[in-house]
Image (cartoon, grey):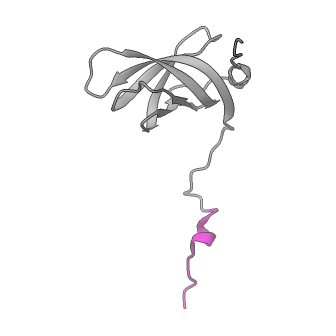
Amino acid sequence: MQPKRHALTQLGSPGATRRVYLRRDTNCPVIVHVGKRNGGDRIAVPSWLVNICEDGCLITSDHIPYKVLDAYIIIPGFASKVHATVKSQGKFTLNFKFSTLLPADIVDKVARIKTIVKS
């Protein structure tokens, strides 16, 4: 008689992908230059950075085009563009994976950026 394999016994299986880097909440504006799957020019999309970690981030915007392939993200306070590919796309969100890992101190600095509402 073979033991039954239930879903609870497979939670710790080596095939499961687990998050390696901790996501840090952010609330700052970014500019995303997206490249669509059908080619052509890049489009600059004003967006909000929702969270970030060393290997990726989540961005939200009302102006995201359909079928985004990759992007350059311009983060305030960061001197260069960050190249990323799309892991998943929703109606108003893009989940990016960076092509190179960002240093942890840069991610912490970006996570501390907060917008202040003028009254």
Q: Residue at x 43, y 22 (%)?
A: 71
Give the residues drawn in magenta, as a range.
1-12
Q: Indicate left or right for 36 with 93 as reference.
A: left
Question: Magenta part mainly helix, strand or loop?
Answer: loop
**Displayed quadrant of residue 27:** top right
Vertical arrangement, residue 38 with respect to residue 79, above or below: below
**Is residue 79 inside the magenta stretch?**
no
Extreme residue in the bottom direction:
1
Vertical arrangement, residue 43 with respect to residue 2, above or below: above
Quadrant containing the N terminus in the rendered view? bottom right
**Displayed quadrant of residue 53:** top right
**Is residue 7 inside the magenta stretch?**
yes
Q: Position of residue 55 (x, y in %)?
A: 59, 32
Extreme residue in the top direction:
79
Extreme residue in the front direction:
119
**Displayed quadrant of residue 28:** top right
Q: Nearer the viewer, residue 90 or 54?
A: 90
Quadrant containing the C terminus in the rendered view? top right
Vertical arrangement, residue 68 with respect to residue 22, above or below: above
